[in-house]
Image (tube, coloured by chain):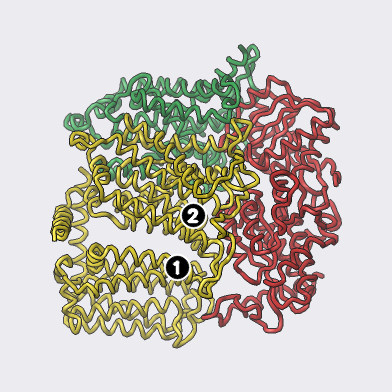
Chain colours: A yellow, B green, C red
C-alpha cells in the first residue's frame, strides 16, 4: 500500500521540479542557448587561471595557465556542455533527436554549480578563509551558474527510443572500445590520487558525468549496443582488466587493493547466485570463503599447517571448493522446510557456528585443525610449476610485483565465476531460480524442482567462493577466524544490494566501492561503518534495486510502474526477434 | 549436585536476560511480522542510557534510590530509539519485498553500534557500569551455591515485567487493540483501531523491556560495551523462536530454556566439545534445529505460515 | 641538546614545506635528491594503529620515532642524508596492515620500519617487508613465534627484530612471582588468542617446574562479557590465585565478576592487563591483583627520565604511552644501522641488505637498557617488572633481569 504512495509522491516531485525549472527558465528563454555556450566558455576559461592563493589545497591550483586535477574536471564539464548545447541546436542536432540534451544540460549545470561551490568552500576551509580563493575560481563559478540558468531556459523535448537507433556496427564497437579505454585509464588515474579530498571530488565528478549521460539517455543506448555486441564487450572488459597492472608502473600498492577487490567481488558474485537469482537471503556467506581459505591454509607448506599432506595446488583448489560446496549443501538443506526471514536467520547461525568452530579447533577444545584464534600464519606464496607468485617479473619493461601475479590468477577465477554466473542465469536453471524467487509455490506447481534448485544455488555459490578462498589463503599469508565475522557477510550482502541484485556489473561496482573507498578515504576511516550502515538503510528506502538494476528486478520493487513494465516487455520482444533472425 | 544447582542458577540468570529481550522480538513480530534485527541494539542503547543518566546526575553515588531513575533513563533512551527507528526506517518499507526490512535492520544495527562507539565518550572500549548498593556486592550463598545479587535483581525484574505485560495485553484497551491487530490488521483497522499507533506501541513495549535488560546486564557484568547488543540480540531471537515467535509467554519460557540449556552445556557436555568455548555453538545449533523441525516453537507461534 | 631541538623542528617543517612545492607532474618522493638538493633522503617507516581503539599506543610509537629522527637529523648523524618519518596506519587490523606495509615497501627511500603494535598484524607485514629486504623493528610484539617460528627454533624472517622481550620471559617471571609469595595452587584462564594462550602456556611450564600446581585450566570467548559460567567452573577447585592470559577489556570484568561470585583470590596477568583501564573495569575489588610488564618503568631509570623530558619538550600532541621508550630505541637501532650501511651507499634500495645486517650487529645504550639483538632478532635485555593494584593504582613491586 505504501509503495503506491511512494510512486505518487515521486511523480508529484517531478512535476514540481519541472515547474521550478520552468519558472527560473522562462525569463531567460530567448537567450538560453547562447547563455549555455557562453557559460561553458567562461567555465573553461576560469580553469586556466589560478583558483587558490596557496599551493597546498586540493593538490595545487595556484598556477596560471596550468590547470590542476580539479580544474581539468571542469574543463571536461565545459566540453560536455558545449557538445550538448550543439546537440540542442546546431551541427549535432541530429544526435539531439536521440538524446535528451536539455535535461542533460540541466543536470550538468546544477552539478557543476554545486561542484564549484563545493570547491570554493573547500579552498576557503582548508586554506583558512575565502580570501585565498583567486578570481579564476569565481569566474568558473559564474560560468557554471550561467550553464545552469541557460539550461533552465531550454525546453526539454521528447527523444526517440534508442532501441530503434540502428547505427553501423563499427561505430557501436568503437564506442564500446572507447568507453572501456576510458575506464582503464580513468581507473589508473583515480587510483594514483593520493589526496583524499581530490579523490572524493574526482569520484563525485565521475558520478555527475555518469548521471548526466544517464539522463541524456546515452546509457540506455550503451546498454542496448552492449547487448548486441556482447562478445566485444566481454573481450574488451577482459583486456582492460588484464592491462590494468601495466598501468601501475611497477607499484604494488594499488595492486594489493585490486586483488582484495577481486577476492571480495568473486565471493559476492557467488552470493549473488543465492540472493540475486534464487532470492534466498544468506547472512553467513563469508563462511564459504573461510572454508576455502582454511582448506588452502591447512594443505599449504606453512610451518603452522595442521595437515601433513601437501598436494598440488590445483587439487587443493578443487578440494577447498568441494568442502565449501558440502557446507553449502548442509546450510542449504533447511531450505526444504524453512524460507524467508527464518532462512536468513538459519544461515546467520551457521555463519556464527563456522566462526566459533574455527576459533575452537585448536587441540584443546576439539581436534587441532585451525590453531584456534591464532589461525594459520606464514603461508608461503603459491608456486605453480616453476612460477613463484612471490617474485617480481619483468614484462615489456614493466615490473609486475607479487600482488600483480595474484591479480592475474584471481582474474582467471573471476572470469570463471562470471562465466558460470551468466551461463546459469540464462539457462533453464536460472529461469527456475527466478521462478522460485518470484513465487515459490507457483514455481513448484509448474513442475520446477524447487528444493533441488535451491540446494544447487547454495552449493554452486559456495563452490565458487571456496575456490576464491583457497587463493585468498596464499594471498593473505595468514588465515584467522576474525576475518570471517558476521560483518563481513553483511559487507558481501551490501555489495550485492548496493550494486544491484542479480547483475554482474552491479556486483563488481558494489564490491569495488566497498573495498576501495575505505582505502582511499582514510579521513573517513573511523566513520566508515557508520556510513555503511546508513547507506544500507537509505538504499532500501530509495533505491532498493541497486545502482545497476536489472530491469526485471527493478519492476519487482516498483510493481505499479506501468511505463517500466512496458519497457521491459518491449526489450524482451526485440530480443526475441533478434534471436529469431 | 551443588554443581548442577550452580549451573541452574547461572542459566536462569542468563535466561531472564534473554527473556526480557526476546519479548521485544516477539511483540513486534506478532504485530507486523517483521524481525526487528536491530532490537539487540535497542537493548545496548538502554544500558548506555542508564549509564549516561548516572554519569550526568549521580556520578559517585551508589545508593539504591538512584536505580529507578537510571532505569527511567534507560527506558527513555531505548524507547526513543525504537520509535524513531520504526518511524523513519521501517514504516516506509511496509509492503516492500521481504528482503528490504531485513537489510534495513542490518544497516540500523551497524549504524547504531557505530554511533555509540564514535560519539559516546570512552565507548571505544568497555566502560565500567556503576555498582549500586544492595543489588550488587558480595555474593549470597545458599548451601554452597553462590548467587550474585545482580542475578536476583535480573530474575525479579523479569517476573515483574512479565506480570505487568500480561496485565497490559489482557486488561487494557490498547492491549486488546494489539491482540486485534495481530489477528487481522485490516479488520482491526475497519473496527477503528489505529494500526500505526499500535505498531509504535509494540516497538515501545519491546524497547521498555530491553532497557530493563540493559540495566540488568550492566549490573551483572559491571561493564557495558557497544558490541553487547549483537550476540545478546541473536540469542534473544533464538529464545523468541524457541518459545514460538509472536507468543509472549513463549518468549519468556524460551529465554529461560535457552539460558539453562547453555549453562548445562557448559557444565555437563564432557570432553573437548563442552565448556564455555562451545556453548554459543550449541545455542545456535538449537536455534537451527528448532527453526527446521519445530518452527512454531515450544508453546506454538501465533503465525505459522511464515516458516 | 634542547637548543638543538628548538632549531631542528622548524628546519624539518621548512624542508617538508619546500619539498611539497613544485611537485606537480612528478611523483612525490620519486627522486631521492629532492628539496634542498645537497642531502639525500632516507625514510624510516612507522606502521602502527594511528586510528581506532589502540590509537593512543600507536601515536606514542609514531611520536617517539619522530623524536629519535629529529635528534639524529639535528646531530647530522648520517652525513649527506636527511632522515624522514613516513607514518602509516594499520588500525590494528591485519588486512589494513598488509596494505600499509605494501605501500611502504613500494617506496624506494624506505630503509627500515618501526612496527607493528599487534603480533597478529606483524604476522602479515613480516613477509611483505622480508620480500623487499626492509628491516622491521617492533617495539611491542611479544609473541615468541614471530622470531622463533612454529617450532620455537627457526627464525622465519631475517628482517624482523624487536626491542621488547617475549612472553616466554613474562610467563616465567609471573610463575616465580607467585611462587615467591607462597601461592602453589593456581587456576589459569586465557582468551585463546596468540598472546593470551602463549602467556598461559609459558606461565604453566615455569609454574609446574617451580613446584606449583595448576588446578584448573579454562578459556573464555573474548566477545563475551559474562564470565559466570567460567567462574563457576574455576571456583570449586579452590585456587589461591587466577592467572589470566589476555588483555584488560576482558581481564577487568573477569576480576570483578570473579570476586562478585565469591572467588576472593588475586588475578594476575601480563602486560596486556597492565593498564589503568583494567582497574576502572575491575572496580574496587581489584585491590591486590597483579600484573607483569616488559622492562622497568620508563621513569625508574635515568635514561628513561631523560627520554620522557625530551619527549615532553618536543610538544607532541599525544603522550609517549606504554611503548614510547621501546619505539625510540627501535628507531635508534635503525639509525645506528644506517650510520654503518649508508656510509658509502648511493641509494637506499641497494643498501637494504647491508642495513639489515648492520641492525643485527648494533649495540648501544638505549632508554630500555643495552639495545642488542640475538641470533633470532630478539632483544638481549630481558627485564620484567611486577606490579600490584594498591589504592586504585598500579604500583611497582619489583623487577628482574631474566636474560
Q: Which secondary structure lies at badge 2?
A: helix
Closer to us: A165 or B201: A165
Closer to us: A359 or B62: A359
Q: Position of residue B4 (x, y in %)?
A: 58, 15
| Res. A481 image quadrant | top right
Q: Which secondary structure lies at badge 1?
A: helix
Q: Which residue is mark 1?
A: A244
Q: Residue at x 22, y 39 (%)?
A: A439
Q: Residue at x 70, y 48 (%)?
A: C149
Left/right placement of residue C272 relative to residue A235 reads right
Left/right placement of residue A469 relative to residue B60 reads left
Separation of residues labelled 2 and 1 (CA atoms): 30 Å
Q: Is residue A148 above or below residue A581?
A: below
Report whether mark 2 lies on the same chain as mark 1: yes
Q: Position of residue B160 (x, y in %)?
A: 45, 21
Q: Residue furthest front?
A: A385
Q: Is residue B89 above or below residue C62?
A: above
Q: Residue at x 43, y 76 (%)?
A: A70
Closer to the eye: label 2 or 1 = 1
**Numbered label attached to residue C287:** none
Q: Position of residue A427 (x, y in %)?
A: 25, 48
Q: Chain of mark 2?
A: A
Q: Chain of mark 1?
A: A
Q: Which residue is mark 2?
A: A527
Q: Position of residue C100 (x, y in %)?
A: 58, 60
Tell me if residue B268 can be seen.
yes
Amino acid at each position: 500500500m505504501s509503495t503506491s504512495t511512494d510512486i505518487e509522491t515521486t511523480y508529484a516531485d517531478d512535476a514540481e521540479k519541472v515547474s521550478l525549472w520552468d519558472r527560473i527558465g522562462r525569463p531567460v528563454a530567448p537567450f538560453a542557448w547562447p547563455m549555455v555556450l557562453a557559460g561553458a566558455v567562461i567555465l573553461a576559461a576560469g580553469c586556466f587561471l589560478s583558483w587558490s592563493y596557496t599551493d597546498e589545497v586540493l593538490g595545487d591550483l595556484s598556477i596560471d595557465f596550468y590547470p590542476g586535477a580539479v580544474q581539468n574536471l571542469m574543463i571536461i564539464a565545459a566540453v560536455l556542455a558545449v557538445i550538448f548545447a550543439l546537440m540542442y541546436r546546431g551541427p549535432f542536432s541530429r544526435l539531439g533527436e536521440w538524446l535528451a540534451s536539455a535535461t542533460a544540460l540541466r543536470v550538468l549545470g546544477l552539478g557543476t554549480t554545486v561542484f564549484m561551490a563545493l570547491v570554493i568552500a573547500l579552498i576557503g576551509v582548508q586554506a583558512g578563509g575565502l580570501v585565498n580563493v583567486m578570481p579564476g575560481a569565481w569566474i568558473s563559478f559564474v560560468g557554471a551558474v550561467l550553464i545552469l540558468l541557460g539550461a533552465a531556459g531550454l525546453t526539454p523535448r521528447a527523444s526517440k527510443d534508442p532501441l530503434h537507433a540502428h547505427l553501423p556496427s563499427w561505430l557501436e564497437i568503437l564506442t564500446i572500445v572507447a568507453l572501456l579505454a576510458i575506464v582503464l585509464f580513468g581507473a589508473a588515474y583515480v587510483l594514483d590520487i593520493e589526496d583524499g579530498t581530490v579523490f572524493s571530488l574526482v569520484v563525485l565528478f565521475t558520478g555527475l558525468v555518469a548521471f548526466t549521460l544517464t539522463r541524456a539517455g546515452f546509457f540506455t543506448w550503451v546498454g542496448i549496443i552492449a547487448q548486441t555486441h556482447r562478445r566485444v564487450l566481454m573481450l574488451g572488459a577482459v583486456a582492460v582488466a588484464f592491462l590494468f597492472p601495466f598501468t601501475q608502473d611497477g607499484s604494488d600498492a594499488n595492486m594489493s587493493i585490486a586483488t582484495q577487490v577481486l577476492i571480495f567481488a568473486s565471493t559476492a558474485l557467488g552470493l549473488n547466485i543465492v540472493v540475486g537469482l534464487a532470492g534466498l537471503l544468506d547472512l553467513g556467506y563469508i563462511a564459504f570463503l573461510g572454508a576455502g581459505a582454511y582448506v588452502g591454509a591447512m594443505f599449504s607448506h606453512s610451518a603452522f599447517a595442521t595437515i601433513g599432506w601437501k598436494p598440488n595446488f590445483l587439487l587443493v583448489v578443487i578440494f577447498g571448493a568441494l568442502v565449501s560446496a558440502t557446507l553449502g549443501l548442509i546450510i542449504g538443506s533447511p531450505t526444504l522446510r524453512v524460507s524467508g526471514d527464518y532462512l536468513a536467520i538459519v544461515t546467520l547461525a551457521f555463519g556464527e557456528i563456522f566462526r566459533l568452530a574455527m576459533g575452537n579447533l585448536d587441540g584443546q577444545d576439539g581436534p587441532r585443525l585451525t590453531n584456534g584464534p591464532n589461525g594459520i600464519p606464514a603461508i608461503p606464496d603459491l608456486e605453480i610449476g616453476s612460477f613463484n607468485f612471490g617474485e617480481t617479473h619483468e614484462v615489456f619493461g614493466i615490473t609486475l610485483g607479487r600482488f600483480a601475479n595474484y591479480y592475474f590468477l584471481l582474474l582467471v577465477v573471476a572470469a570463471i565465476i562470471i562465466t558460470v554466473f551468466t551461463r546459469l542465469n540464462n539457462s533453464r536453471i536460472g529461469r527456475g531460480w527466478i521462478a522460485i524467487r518470484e513465487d515459490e509455490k507457483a514455481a513448484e506447481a509448474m513442475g520446477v524442482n524447487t528444493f533441488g534448485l535451491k540446494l544447487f544455488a547454495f552449493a554452486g555459490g559456495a563452490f565458487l567462493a571456496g575456490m576464491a578462498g583457497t587463493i585468498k589463503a596464499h594471498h593473505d599469508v595468514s588465515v584467522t577466524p576474525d576475518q570471517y565475522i558476521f560483518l563481513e557477510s553483511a559487507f558481501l550482502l551490501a555489495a550485492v544490494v548496493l550494486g544491484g541484485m542479480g547483475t554482474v556489473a552491479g556486483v563488481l561496482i558494489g564490491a569495488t566501492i566497498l573495498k576501495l573507498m575505505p582505502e582511499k578515504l582514510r579521513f573517513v576511516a573511523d566513520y566508515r561503518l557508520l556510513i555503511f550502515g546508513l547507506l544500507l538503510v537509505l538504499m532500501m528506502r530509495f533505491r532498493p534495486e541497486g545502482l545497476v538494476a536489472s530491469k526485471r528486478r527493478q519492476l519487482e520493487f516498483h510493481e505499479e510502474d506501468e511505463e517500466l513494465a512496458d519497457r521491459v516487455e518491449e526489450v524482451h520482444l526485440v530480443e526475441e526477434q533478434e534471436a529469431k533472425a | 549436585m551443588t554443581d548442577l544447582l550452580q549451573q541452574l542458577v547461572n542459566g536462569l540468570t542468563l535466561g531472564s536476560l534473554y527473556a526480557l529481550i526476546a519479548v521485544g522480538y516477539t511483540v513486534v513480530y506478532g504485530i507486523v511480522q517483521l524481525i526487528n534485527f536491530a532490537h539487540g541494539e535497542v537493548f545496548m542503547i538502554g544500558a548506555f542510557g542508564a549509564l549516561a543518566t548516572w554519569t550526568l546526575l549521580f556520578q559517585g553515588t551508589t545508593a539504591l534510590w538512584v536505580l529507578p531513575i537510571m532505569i527511567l533513563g534507560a527506558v527513555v533512551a531505548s524507547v526513543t530509539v525504537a520509535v524513531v527507528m520504526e518511524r523513519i526506517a521501517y514504516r516506509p518499507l511496509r509492503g516492500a519485498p521481504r528482503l528490504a526490512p531485513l537489510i534495513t535492520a542490518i544497516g540500523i544495527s551497524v549504524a547504531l553500534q557505530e554511533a555509540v562507539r564514535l560519539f559516546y565518550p570512552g565507548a571505544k572500549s568497555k566502560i565500567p557500569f556503576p555498582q549500586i548498593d544492595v543489588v550488587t556486592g558480595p555474593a549470597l550463598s545458599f548451601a554452597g551455591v553462590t548467587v550474585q545479587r545482580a542475578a536476583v535483581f535480573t530474575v525479579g525484574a523479569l517476573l515483574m515485567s512479565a506480570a505487568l505485560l500480561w496485565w497490559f495485553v489482557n486488561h487494557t484497551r490498547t492491549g486488546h487493540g494489539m491482540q486485534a491487530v495481530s489477528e487481522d490488521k485490516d479488520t482491526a483497522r475497519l473496527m477503528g483501531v489505529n494500526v500505526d499507533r499500535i505498531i509504535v506501541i509494540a516497538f515501545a513495549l519491546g524497547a521498555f523491556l530491553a532497557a530493563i535488560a540493559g540495566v540488568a546486564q550492566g549490573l551483572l557484568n559491571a561493564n557495558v560495551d557497544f558490541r553487547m547488543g549483537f550476540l545478546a540480540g541473536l540469542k534473544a531471537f533464538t529464545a523468541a523462536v524457541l518459545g514460538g515467535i509472536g507468543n509472549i509467554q513463549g518468549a519468556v519460557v524460551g529465554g529461560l530454556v535457552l539460558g539453562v540449556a547453555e549453562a548445562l552445556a557448559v557444565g555437563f557436555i564432557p570432553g573437548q566439545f563442552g565448556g564455555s568455548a562451545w556453548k554459543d555453538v550449541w545455542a545456535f545449533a538449537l536455534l537451527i534445529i528448532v527453526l527446521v523441525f519445530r518452527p512454531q516453537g515450544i508453546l506454538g507461534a501465533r503465525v505459522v505460515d511464515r516458516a | 641538546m634542547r637548543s638543538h631541538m628548538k632549531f631542528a623542528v622548524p628546519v624539518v617543517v621548512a624542508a617538508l614545506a619546500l619539498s611539497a612545492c613544485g611537485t606537480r607532474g612528478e611523483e612525490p618522493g620519486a627522486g631521492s635528491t629532492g628539496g634542498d638538493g645537497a642531502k639525500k633522503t632516507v625514510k624510516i617507516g612507522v606502521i602502527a594503529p594511528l586510528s581506532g581503539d589502540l590509537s593512543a599506543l600507536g601515536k606514542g610509537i609514531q611520536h617517539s620515532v619522530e623524536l629519535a629522527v629529529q635528534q639524529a637529523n639535528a646531530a647530522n648523524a648520517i652525513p649527506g642524508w636527511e632522515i624522514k618519518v613516513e607514518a602509516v596506519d594499520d588500525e590494528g587490523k591485519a588486512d589494513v596492515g598488509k596494505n600499509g606495509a605494501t605501500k611502504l615497501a613500494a617506496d624506494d627511500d624506505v630503509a627500515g620500519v618501526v612496527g607493528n603494535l599487534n603480533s597478529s598484524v606483524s604476522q602479515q607485514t613480516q613477509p611483505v617487508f622480508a620480500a623487499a629486504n626492509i628491516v622491521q623493528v617492533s617495539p611491542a610484539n611479544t609473541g615468541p613465534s614471530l622470531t622463533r617460528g612454529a617450532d620455537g627454533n627457526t627464525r622465519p624472517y631475517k628482517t624482523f627484530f624487536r626491542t621488547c622481550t617475549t612472553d616466554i620471559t613474562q610467563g616465567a617471571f609471573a610463575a616465580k612471582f607467585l611462587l615467591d609469595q607462597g601461592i602453589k595452587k593456581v587456576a589459569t584462564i586465557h582468551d585463546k588468542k596468540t598472546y593470551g594462550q602463549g602467556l598461559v602456556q609459558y606461565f604453566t611450564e615455569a609454574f609446574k617446574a617451580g613446584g606449583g600446581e595448576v588446578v584448573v585450566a579454562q578459556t573464555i570467548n573474548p566477545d563475551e562479557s559474562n564470565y559466570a559460567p567460567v567462574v563457576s567452573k574455576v571456583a570449586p577447585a579452590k585456587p589461591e590465585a587466577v592467572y589470566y592470559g589476555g588483555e584488560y577489556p576482558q581481564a577487568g570484568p573477569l576480576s570483578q565478576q570473579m570476586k562478585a561470585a565469591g572467588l576472593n583470590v588475586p588475578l594476575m596477568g601480563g602486560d596486556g592487563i597492565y593498564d589503568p583501564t583494567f582497574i576502572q573495569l575491575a572496580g574496587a575489588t581489584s585491590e591486590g591483583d597483579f600484573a607483569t610488564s616488559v622492562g622497568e618503568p620508563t621513569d625508574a631509570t635515568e635514561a628513561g627520565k631523560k627520554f620522557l623530558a625530551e619527549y615532553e619538550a618536543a610538544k607532541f600532541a599525544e603522550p609517549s604511552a606504554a611503548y614510547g621508550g621501546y619505539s625510540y630505541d627501535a628507531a635508534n637501532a635503525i639509525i645506528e644501522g644506517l650510520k654503518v650501511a649508508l656510509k658509502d651507499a648511493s641509494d637506499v634500495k641497494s643498501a637494504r641488505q647491508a642495513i639489515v645486517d648492520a641492525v643485527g650487529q648494533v649495540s648501544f645504550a638505549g632508554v630500555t637498557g643495552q639495545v642488542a639483538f640475538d641470533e633470532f632478532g630478539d632483544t638481549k635485555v630481558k627485564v620484567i617488572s611486577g606490579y600490584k593494584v594498591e589504592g586504585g593504582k598500579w604500583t611497582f613491586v619489583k623487577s628482574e633481569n631474566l636474560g
